[in-house]
Amino acid sequence: MRILLVGAGGVGSAIAKIAARRSFFEAMVVADCDPVRARDAVAGTGPDPRFTAARVDASDRSAVTALLAEHRCDVLLNATDPRFVMPLFDAAFTAGVDYLDMAMSLSRPHPDRPYQECGVKLGDEQFDRSADWERAGRLALGGVGVEPGLSDVFARYAADELFDEIEEIGVRDGANLTVDGYDFAPSFSIWTTIEECLNPPVVWEKDRGWFTTEPFSEPEVFDFPEGIGPVECVNVEHEEVLLIPRWVGAERVTFKYGLGDEFIDVLKTLHKLGLDSTETVTVRDRQVSPRDVVAAALPDPAGLGERMHGKTCAGTWVKGTKDGAPREVYLYHVVDNQWSMAEYGSQAVVWQTAVNPVVALELRATGVWQGTGVLGAEAFAPKPYLDLLTAYGSPWGLREQ
Amino acid sequence: MRILLVGAGGVGSAIAKIAARRSFFEAMVVADCDPVRARDAVAGTGPDPRFTAARVDASDRSAVTALLAEHRCDVLLNATDPRFVMPLFDAAFTAGVDYLDMAMSLSRPHPDRPYQECGVKLGDEQFDRSADWERAGRLALGGVGVEPGLSDVFARYAADELFDEIEEIGVRDGANLTVDGYDFAPSFSIWTTIEECLNPPVVWEKDRGWFTTEPFSEPEVFDFPEGIGPVECVNVEHEEVLLIPRWVGAERVTFKYGLGDEFIDVLKTLHKLGLDSTETVTVRDRQVSPRDVVAAALPDPAGLGERMHGKTCAGTWVKGTKDGAPREVYLYHVVDNQWSMAEYGSQAVVWQTAVNPVVALELRATGVWQGTGVLGAEAFAPKPYLDLLTAYGSPWGLREQ
């Protein structure tokens, strides 16, 4: 397998370091719009001779297609932000290679009833092209990070192995990460968090299909394992809700993000003051986007690993019946920041996102996961995935509720 | 009396309109760095032939002195923001004229113990010059808006007429103003509100003198009159605490601002995220101050009068004894936005600030208030002030607690 990795930010760099310890691929080209970042990511692999750095603009379809051809790649792994999903997805199709990403194409709210009905949903633009990919005999594997990704594998595993009937599948994400020296320092991009959390959250129900709610709806306190403890969670727009119902039978599918009271209050305040906006305002005759200023005023989360303490947990809570008896489980994956920093020099949230597409690539390279068209991780056999993740040194857990 | 009014913003324009109905002065020159604003303020007076517009930079001492001489003014009224107190105060001294403002020279926090001890206090730079003004036989009347100003007159009135011994004097400011069409729209400059509320609040006690606390300290719910009702108030740095103890006997003096839960939460969040900062951050290769962006993202409060509803209340709560019995009163002044818009075309908070220096000028012009040096409103007889305010059509109230 010859891989083109596009994006050498925190997640891309961690992907390179994780892949460097595996033997399933022949070459990985690490490309970024900033050649220094690409070179640094390659340097972080040892250096391993299988890795080379390249410069590419992710929005330039023909440049990406040319780079795939130049290096004879057979798969493109997208580790950029979601704005670049469609150009990279298209470039991979044109080049006739497989494609993987960790998000999916962006949504647009319903023009009249944004908090009741879906407009353009996450992934819609990609699923609309699925027949083309099937005809070409190529696989586009969407949303194969930790959430979406591992969370979807858990959902499929629960359906295959643990339940006869499923009432609800709820992805639940929470952490107890703190950062020394800061009153407030998000462990993930505030720009993206605002985007996710202020978009109308999407819910799926068997009788209604997909629908939306007001932001921060259905608050609940979820008790996370391995010492993280109870965290306030609310509905957030996330790919799992669009992916899971396509392949896994359930009455209801939700995604709730354990933002905690404080973070929810911060996001609500930013929205109330118009500081979440990407529309520019005029300050001393210059145009500036308030959301960019919020991001610039906060520390860069990728650089906070050394000052960070605690654990992050991704997982899937499933409620239903098995052998006629009610059952409720939480399948989860916890990363301790101290471990990921010591072992890989990557902070926990970044490392947890990065390990999953490497596992998926290895299953693809070894022929364990086969398929064509636009698919989610829950379209494939979950057991080999979970076993391989454990073999990577990062086991998962199951808690009976 | 010939007056130079510097500053033709919301308050300056309202001062001109209020003064235009009175006969105590011969001429008022309205000067601003923006000549259009100065002309608009003059046009708002009728026009009244006693008013003329001029352009001046308030930070340019010699230009202000020259303008005072050119128009043979005998008093300078400063209606600019507090950064211009010292240049205008100095220009008035050099020109040999009286000086009035509605704030006082700015404070600087204690370098090591900002939340325990005062550094440079509000008004310190002016009081340091008091002997020079006395020797010159000229009056600098500091902080003679509504708060400080009317609140200080109330304190003196309580001491003279209502109490034998005073335990505590607490200025308390609250409102129930709402603005149609906005989730959040401050009725006063957010830039200045951040400055006031995030500076260390100052408290005076007879045994300790002046000292500071953490921001938002000593929260209390104060019940405001005339239908405004209970509002959460917290300690805020304000001139009254520096002025009142110099002339009025009390055990303790505080200022609490009725920000309400929501506004306090907004200010705390802005501080936590560094968005209150006036230090610039870099956004797309440009330098921008987060506080300026916050102000730009919110509507301009001076233009919200037509969409505003409700009342604003300024007042002084006094606790002590009279004739051996405990007594507790709240002396207050309420402006209904509907009235001030109909009568003067000025929103309530702006009008309430503007009426007070006009009353003070009239008492000075008619010889009722006489004095030299740097003085606060509480250095003078309070009864004529309160009677004249009532004669302006804006009565005050007294509530026995």
Image: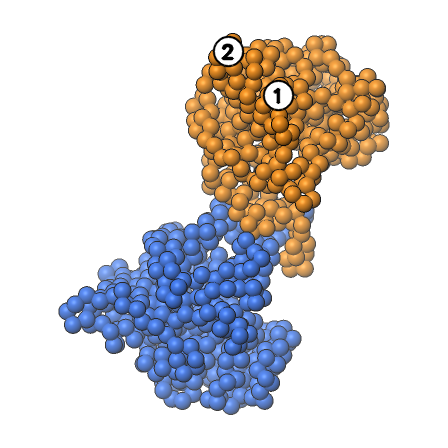
Chain colours: A orange, B blue
Is B44 left, or right, of B354 in this rendering?
A: right
Can residue B4 be seen at all in this image of the molecule?
A: yes
Q: Amino acid at mark 2?
A: Gly
* Residue bearing mark 1: A152
The structure residue drawn at horizontal position 75% and vertical position 32%, both measured from the top left corner, is A125
Which of the two residues, B306 or B104, is positioned nearer the viewer here?
A: B306
Q: Which residue corresponds to the image point at 57% horizontal and 82% vertical from the top-left?
A: B45
The numbered mark 2 sits on a residue in which chain?
A: A
Residue A291's spot in the image, x, y percent?
62, 46
Find numbered disc 1 in the image and state the secondary structure of the residue it sits on.
helix
* Side of A275 where B321 appears, left or right: left
- The reply to whether residue A386 is in sight is no
The image quadrant that residue B394 belongs to is bottom left
Task: Give the secondary structure at mark 2.
Answer: loop
Q: Which of the 4 quarters of the picture holds residue A356? A: top right
Q: CA distance from mark 2 to mark 1?
A: 25 Å
Q: Is the residue B280 above or below the residue B322 in the image?
A: above
**Residue B184 picture location, percent across and down:** 53, 55
- Image position, residue A134 (x, y; %): 80, 19
Query: Where does label 2 land, which residue?
Result: A324
Residue density around tag 1, few if under 14, some if 14–19, many if 20 or more, within 10 Å: many
